[in-house]
């Protein structure tokens, strides 16, 4: 960019990307550091698995107590073949997704709309804190009585684990909006609803997505706890059953599937975040 | 010409002289204080001023004298305790119409492009999308941002961001602009360039401008009249009619004019800086 004092005009001769070091070079640098991080992570994982395998020879008491990577992968293969791995993952995955969706929808809607009234939000505050401090596990027996032992009760558990966090993060985002920015909207003649829609909601997106990432795990915990209490399928059911029968490697096998599910869901939330907030994409 | 005004009287006589059409903005004996619970802090003691059509007034004052409170009161974000604010002769409830407001912070919305940010006010007022876009593009062009229409604020320099903020203000076609140290954060060169463009656009359309600043040189180089405010609780301490005669477009040459430094010295003395 060159500036011409005489004519008082700022003239753009180059796009801003060329002012900084060349993008190809920067991309390559970023890629290289990403690769070395990934390589170190994989090496650490392999090291851990090798040590674990060495410490738990077949038929030893240690193998019974702690399982071994080979036994765990054996169970994984077996569960994949008989289809239970996919069915259980599907069941837990859909419970988690439904709970995640419903909980975040309700929580975010309430959290954002509390911005509308200082009075209502002050009235509601102690109740929200009280509800938020209840351990969700303590609600499980009641949830099963109310919603039965099927899908709905797991979704309810998952929703309950998510809703308060979603409410608090979105409310924080909404009230954190710069007062000067609200004043600017007012001087432009914006109504309260226009301020809400054009400023408060998009400005809260960063906090809402932070909440979404956090609540993926909470939704999964809710679903698994629900399955622990009473269920006939799902990863939580598989873990609980294998644990009751002292088949430790199978517990780990189901746990591996649970972790994989959590990773996939977190990855998807990150993807959606980048899609919905393109202005935060590095240019 | 230089003259001093103690309070409202001088303004009122001047208004009578100007006569018929109502000026865009008249401030009459406005007072404002803040209740801090333990004490009441008077910020504006008694302030009157008149902004004529096409006039540029700079307001300077010692820091913390309540300049920003004044501006927020003028645009209806705060209610005065006493006095009257008349826009085109009428007192307004809430936000006055056709008034543009701009701060040192650009306040651009990070999720909107330069174009999207510029269109904000038109969108709020319900102007059709196609018209809003055309007008916004034209305004960005005029401010030298032609190639940056689709850029997000995070990819623009400070000067360019402030240009977008100016475009967002001007595109609504306000007849009065209220600016609170809009270019204070910019480097000297960007500041001169954007001031030049702004004054051009203001004068070209016969708009009126009230500029709050702590930069005396900026105040003198831009304004037809400089109003010096006293320390808090603030009142008008002095009024200077800035007259250079001839062309005022070249802001660098203007600073070399002997009258320029004369004005600056007088205003500096009025501000009583360092004699607390």
Image: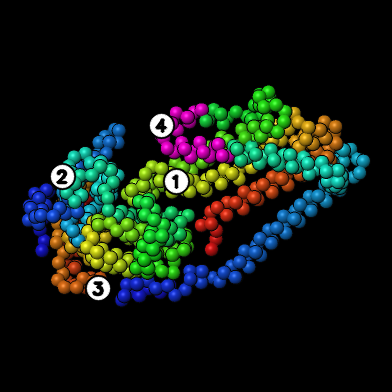
B130 lies above or below A226: below
Please give the chain letter of the residue carrying mark 1.
A
Label 4 or label 3, whichever lies nearer to me, is 4
Real-space Cα separation, disc 4 to disc 3, in angstroms: 55 Å
Residue at numbered disc 4 = A119
Are marks 3 and 2 in one subunit? yes
Label 1 or label 3, whichever lies nearer to me, is 1
Q: Which mark is residue B250?
A: 3
Please give the chain letter of the residue carrying mark 3.
B
Label 1 or label 4, whichever lies nearer to me, is 1
State the extent of the magenta-drawn residues as a range.
A104-127
Q: For mark 1, does the 10 Å Cα neighbourhood hold few (<14), some (14 to 19), or many (20 or more) residues? A: few
- Answer whether residue A119 is magenta in the image: yes
Please give the chain letter of the residue carrying mark 4.
A
Q: Looking at the image, how many numbered discs can be counted on the residues?
A: 4
Q: Is the magenta stretch mostly helix, strand or loop?
A: helix
Residue at numbered disc 1 = A197
Q: Position of residue A202 (x, y in %)?
A: 48, 48
A148 lies above or below A161: above
Residue at numbered disc 2 = B29
- Residue that appears at 50% across and 36% down: A110
């Amino acid at each position: 960019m060159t500036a011409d004092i005489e004519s008082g005009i700022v003239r753009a001769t180059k796009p801003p990307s060329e002012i900084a070091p060349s993008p190809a070079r920067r991309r390559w640098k970023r890629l290289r550091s990403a690769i070395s991080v990934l390589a170190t992570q994989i090496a650490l994982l392999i090291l851990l698995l090798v040590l674990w395998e060495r410490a738990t020879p077949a038929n030893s008491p240690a193998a019974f107590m702690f399982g071994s990577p080979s036994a765990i992968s054996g169970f994984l293969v077996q569960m994949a073949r008989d289809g239970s791995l996919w069915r259980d993952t599907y069941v837990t995955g859909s419970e988690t997704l439904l709970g995640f969706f419903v909980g975040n929808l309700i929580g975010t809607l309430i959290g954002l709309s509390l911005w509308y009234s200082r009075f209502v939000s002050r009235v509601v505050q102690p109740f929200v804190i009280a509800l938020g401090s209840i351990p969700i596990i303590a609600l499980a027996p009641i949830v099963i009585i109310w919603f039965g032992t099927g899908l709905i009760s797991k979704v309810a558990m998952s929703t309950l684990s998510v809703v308060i966090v979603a409410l608090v993060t979105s409310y924080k985002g909404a009230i954190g909006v710069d007062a000067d920015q609200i004043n600017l909207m007012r001087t432009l003649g914006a109504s309260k609803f226009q301020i809400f829609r054009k400023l408060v909601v998009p400005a809260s997106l960063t906090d809402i997505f932070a909440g979404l990432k956090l609540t993926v795990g909470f939704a999964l915990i809710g679903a698994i706890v629900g399955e622990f209490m009473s269920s006939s399928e799902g990863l939580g059911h598989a873990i609980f059953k294998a644990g009751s029968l002292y088949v430790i490697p199978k517990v780990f096998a189901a746990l591996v599937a649970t972790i994989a599910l959590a990773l996939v869901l977190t990855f998807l939330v990150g993807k959606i975040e980048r899609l919905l907030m393109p202005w935060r994409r590095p240019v | 010409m230089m003259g001093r005004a103690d309070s409202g009287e001088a303004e009122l006589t001047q208004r009578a002289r100007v006569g018929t059409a109502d000026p865009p903005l008249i401030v009459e004996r406005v007072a404002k204080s803040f209740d801090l619970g333990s004490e009441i802090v008077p910020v504006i003691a008694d302030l009157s001023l008149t902004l004529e059509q096409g006039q540029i007034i700079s307001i300077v004052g010692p820091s913390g004298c309540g300049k920003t409170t004044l501006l927020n009161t003028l645009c209806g974000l705060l209610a005065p305790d006493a006095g009257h604010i008349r826009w085109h002769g009428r007192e307004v409830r809430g936000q006055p119409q056709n008034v543009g407001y701009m701060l040192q912070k650009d306040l651009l919305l990070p999720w909107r492009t330069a174009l999207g940010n510029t269109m904000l006010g038109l969108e709020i007022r319900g102007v059709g999308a196609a018209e809003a876009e055309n007008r916004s593009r034209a305004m960005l062009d005029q401010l030298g941002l032609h190639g940056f229409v689709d850029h997000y604020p995070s990819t623009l320099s400070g000067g360019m961001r402030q240009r977008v903020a100016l475009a967002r203000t001007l595109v609504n076609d306000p007849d009065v602009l209220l600016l609170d140290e809009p270019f204070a954060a910019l480097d000297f060169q960007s500041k001169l360039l954007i001031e030049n463009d702004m004054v051009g656009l203001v004068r070209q359309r016969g708009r009126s401008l009230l500029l709050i600043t702590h930069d005396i040189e900026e105040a003198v180089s831009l304004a037809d009249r400089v109003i010096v405010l006293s320390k808090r609780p603030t009142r008008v301490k002095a009024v200077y009619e800035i007259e250079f005669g001839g062309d005022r477009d070249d802001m660098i040459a203007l600073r070399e004019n002997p009258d320029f430094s004369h004005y600056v010295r007088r205003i500096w003395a009025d501000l009583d800086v360092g004699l607390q």
